[in-house]
Image (cartoon, rainbow, N blue to C red):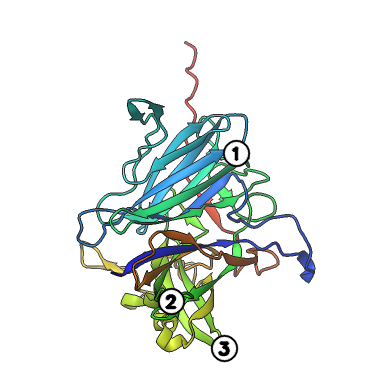
Amino acid sequence: MVRRILIHALAVTLVVGSMGNIALAAQNVANVSQKGSLLVFPRIDTSPISDSGYFRDTIVTIGNDYPGDVHVRCHWINRDQEISGFMFRMTANQPIWFRASDGAGTGLYDDLGITSPLRVAPFFPGEHTTGELKCWAVDAGDTTQIVFNHLYGSAMVFDPINSTSFQYHAWSFTTRNAGTPGSLVLDGATYYDACPQYLTYNFFSRGSSINLPLGEGDATFLDTSLTLVPCHQDLRQDRHPTCTKAKFDIWNENEVKYTGVHQCVKCWFEGYLGNIGKNGEGLGGAKFLYRNLHTIVGRFRVQGMASTACKDVFATTDLHGNRVDPCWTDPADTTFQGQVATPLLGLIATEISFDNGAHLGAVTGSPGNTAGAWGPPLDAAKYPVPQILWDVDQPPTESSRR
């Protein structure tokens, strides 16, 4: 019987010295190994498992490494940029958990069972069952983001039917100055940490296999899924989607370079490398396959770019029969009409089968890497500083004296 294992790899940050020197510098790029004021969980999954009638689920954990309370605002965002927000309080040094499927979480434990006083808004039901989660520290009135570099977190995605799971650390952004309420500026200097200029990963080509060393059979690499989250996002009620082109450069073990691969992204993307560009949303995913890459291992680099290649990709027809393109709506932008260059955050997960059926579980793989900070000295006009925009609450007004 063939068993599958999910191996996950996360993008982390390399500290790069300024002025081209290889030297330690002050950390200013988000990564998965630090505490921060903003956490990004790229992959939340409550999707159905084939025709089994069961669903995958995701458990989120967040820790507060500080002897004082903090309030945390979170937003679920699904693949269609539907938004669901919620806020909760964490006490001093508290770890909490909650489940995406129903929002149940941290409870009271006794011999009779578990109750769940922390119950957040659940992730989206129905067809929109994959996406991401963003959480950041706010004041008690939910009127502004705050500096509180003591949060960290992880998420565990599990499949109860195939008995597989994998866990990953959240991307964490420290902040120096919280800035204007409702705008988390990811500049890497004055406000929050920057996003990376690009992501780079090693991957196993789909269809390749290797022998196990003691005659246990072969391990076959079925495919590798990639999750991409644009750093620039508008989470307000009256928002505009973030639309970008994910451009890929690929190298095989013989240093042969493959280009011309891209995937159009609206707000969030998840899919197998071999299916990049499927359904007219890009081009070139077949270059990730063993029969075209010609080696077992390859590497790729991906970055978000503004491009005319994604025009009409996400267009729909409205109730009046008019063609509407949510990613081509800014007449003031005479070139790209609202398509943006934005840095990306990511996650990869590789599925493996073993022909002897002796292995089952989840194994942590090698992390991906990032390079430098998005922003200066990059061209500010071509590569604008990303922001996370959100609707702040207004404090209640004082009653006037009569």
400, 125: nearer the viewer = 125
Q: Amino acid at mark 3?
A: Asn
Q: How far is disc 3 from disc 1 in space, using C-alphas? A: 49 Å
Q: Residues within 10 Å of mark 3 (few under 14, many from 20)?
A: few
337, 167: nearer the viewer = 167
Residue at 53% from the left image edge and 48% from the top image edge: 39
Q: Which residue is mark 1?
A: 146
Q: Nearer the viewer, mark 3 or mark 1?
A: 3
Q: Amino acid at mark 2?
A: Gly
158, 67: nearer the viewer = 158
Q: Earlier in the sequence, mark 2 or mark 3?
A: 2
Is residue 222 visible in this depiction of the protein? Answer: yes
Q: How far is disc 2 from disc 1 in space, using C-alphas? A: 56 Å
Image: 265 above or below 123? below
**SS at badge 2:** loop
Q: Nearer the viewer, mark 2 or mark 1?
A: 2
Q: Which residue is mark 3?
A: 254
Q: Nearer the viewer, mark 2 or mark 3?
A: 2
Q: Earlier in the sequence, mark 2 or mark 1?
A: 1
**Residue farthest to the front?**
214
393, 58: nearer the viewer = 58
**Residue 215's mark?**
2
Is residue 328 visible in this depiction of the protein? Answer: no
Q: Residues within 10 Å of mark 1 (few under 14, many from 20)?
A: many
Q: Amino acid at mark 1?
A: Ile
Evaluate if marks 2 and 3 touch, with contact meaning CB atoms under 8 Å apart: no
Evaluate if marks 2 and 1 touch, with contact meaning CB atoms under 8 Å apart: no
Residue 193 placement (x, y as % from top left): 63, 53
